Amino acid sequence: MGRVVAAAVYSAGKKITDISLDEGAQWARRPGHFVWIGLEQPSAEQMAQLQKQFDLHELAIEDALEVHSRPKLETFGDALFIVTYSPIRQGDKVEFVETHIFAGRGYIITCRNGHSASYASVRKRCEARPLLLDHGEDFVLYALLDFVTENYQPVSETIHGEIESLERRVLGGSLNEADIQHLHGLRRELLRMRRYVAPMVEISEDLQRLDFPFIDKNMRPYFRDVQIHVNRQMEDLGTMSDIATQTIEIGLLLESSRQSLTQRKFAAWAAILAFPTAIAGIYGMNFENMPELSWHYGYYIVLGVIISGCSGLFIGFKRAGWL
């Protein structure tokens, strides 16, 4: 059985009283009143009870009992059904908690299917602004969508901080496999968040454009405010994803540069060592008629040639930046 987090009736911007689920419909029919019901993981029996009371469309109820892949808005007559997702950071992964919102004349119903941030803070915030709460269901709907959008901010800021830390580590030292995996994981989570945020743009646009009896035209700028926040969040997520990708690419380029420098050093030393090896190889051949073998100072001359040649190669490679 699902848990009823809160159920209350409001009028003229003030809370009138707490109610049970059985009382919702009779209060919702009163002029100038609306009920706000919040459920956590509601059961099929509770959803059927709400359907009977508020005349919710059967397709909306059927939709609410399913698991969706992304946010959406559907209309059923003069009522709305909205699917939203709130992110939760658990370790290195981001989980998304699904919430269903039913909105119509005289009622707002939220069904949260997980342990995301509670909507109790939204209720307190709305009750603290009676002039705006006096607008009724449309202001509560705006507050709920704005709260969902705000939930992405702390998660994205945490990921942003981790990306910046990894970026400094990559630029200041060598790139290891764990850093690459971490960056790739963060980039994957950012893309997932973007996939859940993007449909909110369309939802906020529809709420500005569509004509519903319970949405006052004066409230449309508030839904535009949600759209602005969503667009900003989309930009931030895209920027962070690009930074993560560029950090991986820069790290790989730096690692390739460091490997190239090491290879050049090995090549330079190999060339220096090849010079005395070549001379030693020549005088190590077993031929009798080698005039240098009978020189009194031949050994010292050859030794000097080796030292001079190696020194010349060392200076040349040093100036070329290979050593």
Image (spheres, rainbow, N blue to C red):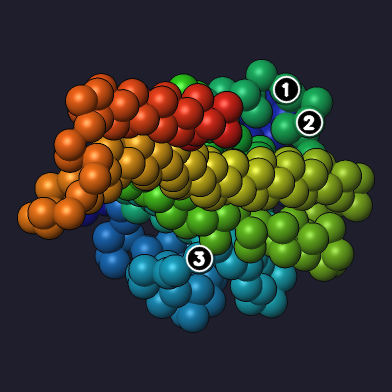
Of the image marks 1 and 3, the number of the one nearer the N terminus? 3
**Label 2, on which residue?**
132
**Amino acid on which disc 2 is placed:** Leu
Of the two numbered discs 3 and 2 in the rendering, the one whose residue sits closer to the viewer: 3
Identify the residue shown where x is 57% and y is 33%. 320
Q: x and y percent of residue 300 in the render?
A: 25, 22
Of the two numbered discs 1 and 3 in the rendering, the one whose residue sits closer to the viewer: 3
Q: Secondary structure at mark 2?
A: helix
- Return the residue nearer the eye: 27 or 56: 56
**Label 3, on which residue?**
70
Q: x and y percent of residue 157 in the render?
A: 54, 29
**Label 1, on which residue?**
129
- Going by the image, does 148 lie left or right of 278? right
Report how far apart the C-alphas of labels 1 and 3 lie in the structure.
31 Å
Residue 268 in view of the camera: yes
Report how far apart the C-alphas of labels 3 and 2 lie in the structure.
30 Å
Residue 143 sits in quarter? top right
Q: x and y percent of residue 83 in the render?
A: 52, 61
Kindly indicate whether the residue at mark 3 contacts the one at mark 1 (C-beta within 8 angstroms): no
**Amino acid on which disc 1 is placed:** Arg
Q: Residue pushed farthest top? A: 128
Residue 24 in view of the camera: no
- Return the residue nearer the eye: 125 or 260: 260
Q: Crowding at label 2, few (<14), some or many (≥20) Cα neighbours within 10 Å?
A: some
- Return the residue nearer the eye: 236 or 218: 236
Q: Secondary structure at mark 3?
A: loop
Q: x and y percent of residue 29 in the render?
A: 64, 55
Where 182 sits versus 103, above or below?
above
Kindly indicate whether the residue at mark 1 contacts the one at mark 2 (C-beta within 8 angstroms): yes
**Amino acid on which disc 3 is placed:** Arg
